[in-house]
Image (cartoon, grey):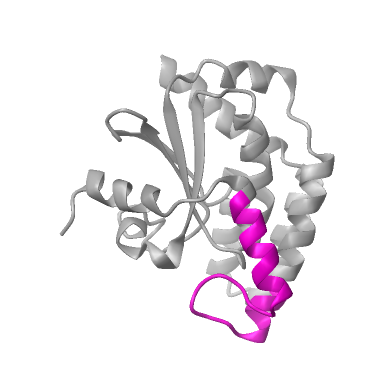
Amino acid sequence: MMTSKTLFQEALHKSLSYEEYRKLVDNLFEQGQTTGPNQSEKMVHYTGLNIQRMQKWEKRYAPAPGSLEAMTSVRDEIWLILTEGWCGDAAHSLPVIHKLTQVNKSIDLRLVLRDENLELMDTHLTDGGRSIPKLIRLRKETLEEIGEWGPRPEPAQNMFKEMRAAGVPHDEYTKALQLWYARDRGKTIEMEIAKMVAEAKV
């Protein structure tokens, strides 16, 4: 079994910038494909919806000044995100995280595909599942892990758990989550990321 540092090194070796990830997802979709081994029509359809969602937040989302100020305190970190193009939660979260990290060149935002990094994913499970997106904060020099976030903002995760426990069908709880993200406009993700950064300084 590989050490955490080795897993991070391997993942970073094949990681992408946000822009590279977006281009990959767009190019695959144009070819009728998506990321990961499941190339079903449904997964490709989800990817098309997610491209639209990412484009929307790239245009509309603007971080609050206080959150941007909190981000400037980060020094020499890598923010590694496990994701996939078909993941609806990632489509809402990634543009927000990207805009937050753009304010600080000391943060190196890198994205990797979950299904190409399952051993790393399995060290960052959520309630025993390979839920994404998962953000892992690392010290740039040592690759020491100093925190994580994901796969969803806390209110959305609580809603997800309640609906799953109540036996709500997949399509219904997925639709409810998408409505939550649309109404929240990225503000809870922003707040939780800013809080994570602020608490790390204490």
Q: Does residue 77 lie above or below 59 as drawn?
A: above
Task: Let me know if residue 73 is in the magenta part.
Answer: no
- Quarter location, residue 31: bottom right
Name the residue rendered at 83%, 43% in the picture: 59
Q: Is residue 173 visible?
A: no
Classify residue 18 as left or right of residue 9: right
Residue 194 percent location from the top left of the image: 58, 26
> Residue 95 versus residue 30: which sits nearer the camera?
30
Residue 87 percent location from the top left of the image: 60, 64
Q: Quadrant of the N terminus?
A: bottom left
Name the residue rendered at 28%, 51% in the picture: 7
Q: Is residue 195 visible?
A: yes
Task: Let me know if residue 34 is in the magenta part.
Answer: yes
Residue 70 percent location from the top left of the image: 59, 18
> Residue 193 versus residue 51: which sits nearer the camera?
51
Q: Quadrant of the C terminus?
A: top left
Classify residue 62 as left or right of residue 29: right
Q: Which residues are magenta?
A: 20-46
Residue 125 percent location from the top left of the image: 37, 57
Principal secondary structure, stretch drawn in magenta: helix
Name the residue rendered at 43%, 34% in the picture: 78
Classify residue 92 as left or right of residue 79: right
- Quarter location, residue 173: bottom right
Q: Does residue 5 lie above or below 63 as drawn?
A: below
